Amino acid sequence: MTTPAPRPIEVACPTCGETTVYAASNAFRPFCSARCQGQDFGAWANEAYRVEAPPSSEDQDEAER
Ligand SMILES: [Zn+2]
């Protein structure tokens, strides 16, 4: 009788969609590589920055007068 080996949890990389192992052996989880990890973080940071600093029409009106 054989004992079933624990299956590695596989997830899709949020950046490229490639299947990657979500385990301690994967330092970039849930991404497949450092490259995908960096790309996703860059996009997230840009998005966050955009939300944090919305264009203010009031300031523009003030400057025009
Ligand atoms: Zn990837």
Image (cartoon, rainbow, N blue to C red):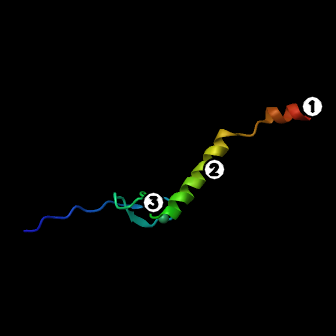
Decide which of tag 2 and tag 3 comes sooner along the chain: 3
Q: Secondary structure at mark 3?
A: loop
Q: Residue drawn 69% across and 40% down?
A: 53
**What residue sits right under mark 3 in the picture?**
31
Residue 57 drawn above or below residue 3: above
Can residue 28 be seen in this snapshot? yes
Q: Secondary structure at mark 1?
A: loop
Badge 3 amino acid: Phe
**What residue sits right under mark 2 in the picture?**
46
Measure how far apart labels 3 and 1 are at the Cα level: 50 Å
Residue 48 drawn above or below residue 57: below
Q: Point out which mark residue 12 bears.
A: none
The picture places residue 41, in percent across and down from the top left corner, at: 55, 53
Q: Is mark 3 within 8 Å of ligand 1?
A: yes
Residue 41 drawn above or below residue 33: above
Quadrant position of the C terminus in the picture: top right
Q: Determine whether label 2 and label 3 are within 8 Å by CB.
A: no
Q: Residue drawn 34% across and 61% down?
A: 25
Q: How many marks?
A: 3
Measure how far apart labels 2 and 3 are at the Cα level: 19 Å
Q: Residue drawn 45% across and 60% down?
A: 31
Please indicate whether residue 24 sits to the left or right of residue 44 in the image: left
**What residue sits right under mark 1 in the picture?**
65
